[in-house]
Amino acid sequence: MVVFVLLASLDNVAIGLVPPLYGSIGSDLGVGEGHIALATTVMFLLSAVAAVGWAYAGDRTDRKPVLIAGTVIWVAGTAWSGLAGGYPSFLLAQILAAIGLGGVASVSFAVVSDLISPRRRGLAMSFWGLSQGVGTLAGTMTGGLLGAGDWRRPFLVVAVAGVVATVAYLFTYDVPRGDSQPELRGVAYDERIHRDALPTILARRTNVWLILQGLTAQAAFGSLVWLPVLFRARAEDQGYSTATAVVVGSVFATLFQLGGALSILGGLVGDRLQRRTPRGRALVAAVGILAAVPFYVVLYFVPFRIDVPDGGSTGAVIRAVLADVVTEPSVGLSLAIAVLALALTSANSPNWFALIADVNPPEHRGTVYSLGNLVNGVGRAGGNALVGVAFRGLSGAFPPPLNYAVGLAAFQFFFIPTGIMYWLAGRTVARDMADTHAALATYADHEQATATRAPRP
């Protein structure tokens, strides 16, 4: 489990490296920030598309070689990104990394779902999902701090870490499919996904809502990659140099996303409510998503003043930012609102993971996850791209950083249809869970009956 958590974290570190460095990479490669943002958008989309193929391969064959191959590919692409001499080379490197990244999350999700019993899925998936959120934060921090003086350095460091994680995975236990399912206890489960599985997957109505919710949810989440840009612009508006503003933006964006760590509570509450009603996980996700919207909107407009040493070392700037949290009431208030908003929306992640495992047999889980991730990628890429267009359009009426605040606030309303879709999933989940459990029990009964009838040697 630890190795899978590490792998899930590292692939998100690689994804999070670029946004804090849009300006630095663009300046060095001779292109504008929009070109580098395009590379991020392409990365989101391509990794989501590639995940479908990786997940199908993982559900169809042995998962360990598939996961190793995906990791090796994204490590190579990340290292190449740090060595790129021009924009075309950088874009191609990001594409290669995206292809590999698509395989890590989708295949490791299926493996992790087989490690954890249904009663504790929310809690376990909260740690797995948290590792991805921590990875994104670490990527933002790594990009902003290690890349403040040299944008290439963080890519090479993360590539080396990926090599270490791959070597560690070679020595892990190969988890059997369905290993944690109570219905399959004592039975060797050897089912594999087939080409005609898509109609069966979509016939489970809960899957449809779980997949579609990502389109709007990730439009909102995708806009959040611009948080470092918003806080950098606020620092520049207060007169700080670009180098100092980049560090400030990365640190504030990281601090303001710490509420994601509270996804553990979302997973625990989902587990507990699920024991009372099959709708439990869906209801927790719906309430969390909808309740967070007003807090996000308020967050972007809370004014705050920072006091950091302009041109100081990275460590000095970080210490000053942390001191501001205590000494500047507006900064402390902003942090409190951000943590609460992220805590509420973070209830989405573990319960989404657990719901996919609850309503699908083991041989379908990776593919269903990847289909959801594909829609997530479209929504996230759309959010990332459209919010940039919105910023430019708003800049005529609202000078920076106000244009960033208005654009980000508007995109949070995409969470409303997401909450509605979770509520709709709650109406069908009981039936879909019952059908899946019945199918697994029938398989187990058949295998046990066959073993009993088999002649002794």
Image (cartoon, rainbow, N blue to C red):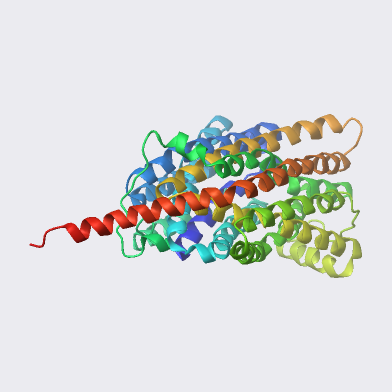
Which image quadrant: the C terminus? bottom left
Residue 31 position in % (x across, y down): 67, 31
Is residue 432 found left or right of 265 in the rendered image? left
Whether 241 is drawn above or below 258: the answer is: above
Vertical order, 53 against 177 (above or below)? above
User: In this rendering, does residue 372 appear at all?
Assistant: yes
Q: Position of residue 98 (x, y in %)?
A: 51, 40
Q: Which residue is rendered at x = 25% and y = 57% of the image? A: 449
Residue under the point 63% across and 57% down: 281
Q: Which is nearer the eye, 83 or 8?
A: 8
Q: Nearer the viewer, residue 297 or 115?
A: 115
Residue 13 visible? The answer is no
Which quadrant holds residue 321?
Answer: bottom right
- Side of 289 where 137 appears, left or right: left
Q: Residue at x 57, y 44 (%)?
A: 206
Give the mark count. 0
Q: Would residue 116 appear left or right of 66 to someone viewing this image?
A: right
Q: Residue furthest left?
A: 457
Residue 398 coordinates in the image, percent (x, y): 91, 36
User: At x 70% / y 32%, what residue is drawn?
Assistant: 34
Above/below status of 386 relative to 302: above
Of residues 173 and 136, which is closer to you in this image?
Answer: 173
| Camera-side residue of 190 and 36 | 190
Instruction: Pinpoint residue 96: horizontal percent, then vertical percent.
Output: 47, 38
In the figure, is residue 2 to the left or right of 206? left
